[in-house]
Image: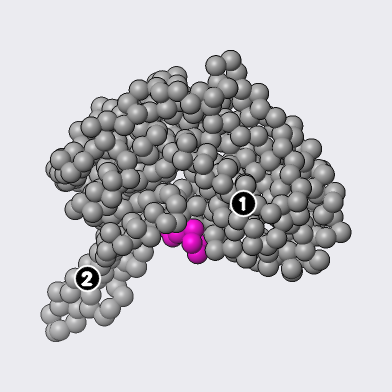
Amino acid sequence: MNTRLEDPRTGLPRGTAPLSREPEVGAAVAAGRAALGAWSSLTPRERAGRLDRLAALIEADTARYVARERAGTGKPDVETAGEVAQVADLFRFYATAARAATAPAAGALVAGHESWVRWEPVGVVGVVVPWNYPLMMAAWRCAPALAAGNTVVVKPAETTPDTVELLAEHAAAALGEGVLQSLPGDRSTGRLLVGSPVDMVAFTGSGRAGLDVTARAGTRRTSLELGGNAPALVLPDAPADTFASLAEAATYNAGQSCAAPARVITLTENYEATVAALSTAMGARLAGRDFGPLNNREQVARYDSLVAASAAKRRSAAGISAGPGEEGGHWRPALVLADLPEDDPAVVEEVFGPLLTVQHAPTVDAALRLANGVPHALAASAWTTDLGTGLDLAGRLDAGEVWLNCHLVQTAELPHGGRGSSGHGTDLSALALREYQRPKTVTVRLPRRAGGAPR
């Protein structure tokens, strides 16, 4: 059974991919279980060497990764090439991070006893990743899981199986058979994987799907990144490049980023100037030249529905510069919506497209309440040249990641994770290793010296 793949740049068919069902899911999980013992028994140094070889294979085959990622997502080459480089770096980062990990609570904590903590892999991890960053989201999940000694079965999104398939091929060569596997398919495949005897589920996707994952996973561990609706709090003394920076971040990957700025909130005194500046900055960003299309027909329908339902009184749309033969693609222009109510669908929902809404409040505290007024709490930014005010806002914004005078600046060393309906768990940084490990306390009674005293 296969599913048809579509080129989001043209809207035309580009091939097919398998739809994995119970036999394929069962075989993949069994292979991961069979490979677990040998992989987890390697020393951190040995695993690091193999992960480093995987990173080298990715770098050596960058052109093929870029072509596959572009075919599935429509992203410009400059975006995909940058993401492939990040993926290779991520595997190298976790190869080293696992070797540097230390265990807490060791020593004579109870009289006459010696105790320590072993950090052990969870086992076979089922990973489900979305279509907006097919390769990078797989690496965010797989790299720390593998470095921690787990084996992984990855279910890529139905529309973008291409680069995960290639990653699994390279992983088989660098890490060994069964250590990292690709399981192409649709939502039914994902449900089958979550319901299979994996030891943990790492899921990145929508909030509704995250609730379903939690219900199916039961008592097993889950790590959930469930999207965002990031506010950008812009004060009157914001830096001169604020609006150009926000427009670039809001249109990167056509705005299909969970942490992308979505809701610009400013003070009433600065509202008209903010709307004008944002409209100019977004108007300079052209779909087809500066960013790619929406990923698939379902996302196009959802995006168009949210935009149509918005009660915004002012709409400022940029242009589309699609190439020859790409006129039928899923292109949408950069868009600014202004003069809209607080409960507008474009404000309370994660729009996931090249769109910014603009709201205003009379005071900074009121603006902060708007910023924190949606269930999502993944990312946020504040824009002001007053360092004290900026740091205060960074502490008061309810989000797992906050930027000051920038947005979407990330690196392997810094953790990323959500709160509220944005899920729980940590991606990136050495902290993510703990997502895929479980502690075991070992306590030994010491032999007693002559005369009854412990040695």
Residue identifier under label 1: 309
| Magenta run includes residue 424 | yes
Q: Is residue 286 left or right of residue 110?
A: right
Q: Identify the residue at horizontal 31%, vertical 53% (top origin).
A: 201
Q: At label 1, which amino acid type do we have?
A: Ala
Q: At label 2, which amino acid type do we have?
A: Thr
Q: Nearer the viewer, residue 216 or 386?
A: 216
- Whether residue 397 appears in this view of the structure is no
Q: Residues within 10 Å of mark 1 (few under 14, many from 20)?
A: few
Residue identifier under label 2: 443
Question: Of the numbered discs in the image, which one, if any, rests on residue 442?
Answer: none
Label 2 secondary element: strand
CB under 8 Å between discs 2 and 1: no
Residue range (magenta): 419-425
* Quarter of the figure with residue 49: top left
Camera-side mark, 2 or 1:
1
Q: Is residue 225 left or right of residue 276?
A: left
